[in-house]
Image: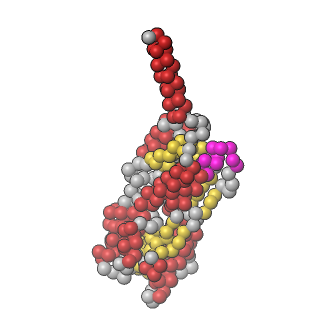
Amino acid sequence: MKKLSMVLLVLLIAGTMFAQGTKENASAYNIYLITMDQMDQHWVNVDKGAQKAAEELGNVNYKWLAPDVKDDAKQIESINNAVAGGADAILLAANGPNAVTAALKEAADAGVTIVYVDSAANFPAVQTLATDNTAAGTTAANVMIAALKENGVTSGKIGIISVNSATASTVAREAGFRKAFEGTSFNILETQYCNGDAAVSKDMSANFITQGVVGLFGANEGSTVGVGNAIAEAGTGVIGVGFDKSDMILSLIKNGYILATMAQNPDVMGYEGVKTAYRALNGEVISPEYVDTGVSVLTKANL
């Protein structure tokens, strides 16, 4: 009886040690994706790309964390939760360049590898994978200018709806957009910020329309949806150009309410971001510091 009890005890200990060894496998990395929010289809597609990379690598524990809305305090909380959860690496789309830097320093001090996707903060990271937002903003403006001229419009007011005045990606888009209008007879009005909320964007766009704008630019997914819905409701010939790709935006393009959108490659950001984090965790030197993940101009003609 004593021998049997001893055998069972040894088996129990061995089983426990095996379970712990499996859970704490040194070759399995914990990689977290933290985006600005969960609202936009853009972030869903970043997550899909990241999931695909994690599945291919096989020894990555991957998790997506995000606030329900764009909020600096909530994003900081997500970063802290990732660190507390044992993150080896964090892929971050920063809501603002400065608000999260203290949280990122604490993460880095804890040994967490930082990779930026879509939008960077003012804190060192091994790599940033994002659209060349300034160039894409300029492209959006050039598409609008060409369409206006084709309609015989060579002057007038232009409205911009963006997220906020801090997010690096959308600030760069606005800068590129404005630059393309320099030297023209068009007057770009003061940018309105909707925090990425499509309903708020719609109201702001409707206000612009009452001011007699000839063009509206939405700098992200929510902004673009609001622009398109306002144009649809007003039934005007305002030229709407936007940013990002979602089912709603594509529908607005098909129905003629949005002329074009600058479609990013969020799946590439997520996919390559996880691969970059994995290589960095394995001690590889990461180069270059910035990777342009590309953008395409989508119109009704090429949907």
Residue drawn at point x = 49 percent, y = 40 percent:
82
Residue drawn at point x = 47 percent, y = 79 percent:
302
Viewed as shown, does residue 24 lie left or right of 246?
Answer: right
Viewed as shown, does residue 82 lie left or right of 114?
Answer: left
- The percent coordinates of residue 100 (x first, y second) are 51, 45
Q: Is residue 5 visible?
A: yes
Residue drawn at point x = 45 percent, y = 43 percent:
78
Q: Which residues are magenta?
A: 276-285
Q: How is the image coloured?
A: secondary structure
- The percent coordinates of residue 128 (x first, y second) are 60, 55
Viewed as shown, does residue 232 lie left or right of 266?
Answer: left
The C terminus lies in quadrant: bottom left
- Residue projecting furthest to the top: 2
Q: Quadrant of residue 139?
A: bottom right
Q: Is residue 145 above or below residue 52?
A: below
| Prevailing secondary structure of the magenta residues | helix
Q: Is residue 45 above or below residue 181?
A: above
- The percent coordinates of residue 214 (x first, y second) are 41, 79
The N terminus lies in quadrant: top left
- Toward the viewer: 163 or 186? 163
Q: Is residue 2 above or below residue 72?
A: above
Is 280 part of what is drawn in magenta? yes
Q: Is residue 176 visible?
A: no
Is 87 part of what is drawn in magenta? no
- The percent coordinates of residue 300 (x first, y second) are 43, 79
- Residue projecting furthest to the left: 233
- Toward the viewer: 1 or 279? 1
- Toward the viewer: 191 or 135? 135
Residue drawn at point x = 49 percent, y = 17 percent:
7
- Toward the viewer: 55 or 39? 55
Number of dots carrying numbers: 0
